[in-house]
Amino acid sequence: PPYVREEWAAPSGEHRLPQFAPGAEEYGVAEAAVSARIGATEEGVTHNKANRILLDGAKAMGYAAKTAAQNFRVPDDEGAGWSCFGDRDENKQGTLVTYLLDAAETGRCHFI
């Protein structure tokens, strides 16, 4: 949220990281690169009944509500909502099948 980024960027604050300021181009470029690499998108997301009710109810009450980006190769796959229990098909495009795989394939890493 913007208030967290403001705290991180504050020149008199604990972190002093101006690249995190809301609207900072550097942050936007980095966020877009990460989202692209892990395939995060709102497109094709299928909500279960509980999430659909929550989303519709929030909108009906005037709250800002939207689908969060998800990083699945096949977002509407039947097993997508169960990846927290394991993902043998590597549908979830998390660190294990993106960044760690990239590092291992390029040799630009050392695993301890």
Image (cartoon, rainbow, N blue to C red):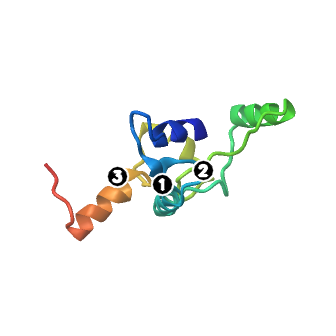
Q: Which residue is mark 1?
A: 91
Image coordinates of residue 53 in percent, x first then y, are 77, 32
Q: Within 10 Å of the Cα at label 1, are there few (<14), some (14-19), or many (20+) other Cα atoms?
A: some
Name the residue rendered at 59%, 41% in the picture: 2
| Dot label at residue 96 | 3
Q: Which residue is mark 2?
A: 69
Label 3 sits on a secondary structure element that is helix
**CA gap, disc 3 to disc 2?**
18 Å
Task: Tell me if residue 89 comes above or below residue 68 in the rendering.
Answer: below
Image coordinates of residue 40 in percent, x first then y, are 55, 56
Q: Is residue 79 visible?
A: no
Name the residue rendered at 56%, 41% in the picture: 81
Q: Quadrant of residue 98?
A: bottom left
Label located before the other in sequence (2 or 1): 2
Under mark 3, the amino acid is Leu
Looking at the image, residue 32 sits to the left or right of residue 44; the answer is: left
Label 2 sits on a secondary structure element that is loop
Under mark 2, the amino acid is Ala
Label located before the other in sequence (3 or 2): 2
Label located before the other in sequence (3 or 1): 1
Name the residue rendered at 48%, 60% in the picture: 26
